[in-house]
Amino acid sequence: MVLSESSRAQSGVVAPIGGLFLFAIAAGYLMSLLPLSLLPLGMPEAMAAWLASSLYGGLLLGAMFIEPLVKKIGHRWSLILSLAVLVVTIAVMWLLPYPMVWLGMRLLAGIATAGVFVVVESWLLLVEDERKRGLRLGLYMTALYGGNALGQLLIGQFGFTGSLPFGVVMGLMLSAIVPVLVARNSSPPPLALEPVESAPQVKRVSISATIGCLISGLLLGPMYGLMPVYLHQQPLLEGQTGLMMALMVVGGMAVQPLGSWLSSRIGKALLMSMFSLVGALSAVLMVQAQSSMDFGVAMVLLGASAFVLYPIAINQACEGVSASKIVRVTQLMLLSYSVGSVTGPLLAQGVTHINLGMAQYLGIIFLATALYMLIAALKKIAPVMQPPKGME
């Protein structure tokens, strides 16, 4: 299915980006609020990893089932419903601070978050021009990570104890519904979504793109779920947890224009390999840091390298894909990301029991990714470099 010019015009960016930005501020604050509030609420600190995995378990479930909802009620109402469910989960956690309730609510929040991501990503990707897709993805990631960075700074403003932090998060999440609710004419028109399960169609979804989304989950799951606790325990960073998390997210936001620009000029597997090497360097800097400034530089590099992998991978997955299959492809990529996100926090926590830490875990994942993507890039260019038959 090819979108008409009028359909393209309708598929605007203001409503989804505005809603996403406010959602990201709330999610960024909540990212640090939940693990830091465990001890004050009488829950074990070790539950932080389980909360992260529960969220991403919900993300995994949501990624599998969100497409029929989008097909039935459209992008706009799917996004409104997802945000409303998130508000409900925060309210329940605020009123009932018990481990099993929180785990259940984070699972439900993950399902709703999958709705936000799939809807906004497919909404923005419903254009035929690949460079425009890259620009829109850059805008998407900038809004997401910029909002996350602002949200991290709210820890310093409102703290992580008492009722006020949860009230602020709910208010922000409710405000995210407003731009989507009022923008009635910007939602994409209904699409006759086509499956991509047949063998010829599956082959068009790049393996390295799928692996890139998986790796992104293995990195971002622990970074979102466990990094606040890790930073809180560092003697060099007393009282600077929110600042360091913000620097990490700012690094991810700042690199998006560069990632978008390079994505249309360099092979995407090679580009992911290059950024992964930077990520490995950031892990080394975290281990060797002698001051909070050293740590801050490491966090900026960490965010720049980790947060750019997903948009590069999903852009690669959407190459040559028709508009009618965009929702399904973004769903498949989110599914891959979710598998990594579910296992990442538990793997990272397991690493700490063998005399390693968060930085070492991230360094291992980055280095393995750099090597894999480099091999994938070389395999892709090898046939081009071979001489034609009869010319040997």
Image (cartoon, rainbow, N blue to C red):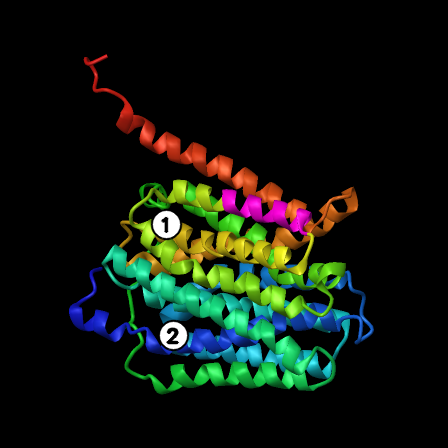
Instruction: Identify the residue at horizontal 64%, vertical 51% (top origin).
Output: 286
Looking at the picture, tell me which residue is in the foreground, 31 or 252: 252
| Residue pointed to by mark 1 | 317
Where's the N terminus, which quadrant? Answer: bottom left
Which region of the structure is painted magenta? 277-289
Percent x, y of residue 138: 37, 62
- Return the x and y of residue 211 as percentages of the image width and height: 48, 44
Magenta span: chief secondary structure: helix
Identify the residue shown where x is 57% and y is 71%: 28
Label 1: state its secondary structure.
helix
Type of amino acid at the residue the image marks with label 2: Pro
Q: Is residue 196 above or below residue 200?
A: below
Q: Residue furthest left?
A: 5
Q: Is residue 57 visible?
A: no
Q: Which is nearer the eye, 129 or 142?
A: 142
Q: Which residue is mark 2?
A: 16
Res. 128 visible in picture:
yes
Q: Amino acid at mark 1?
A: Ala
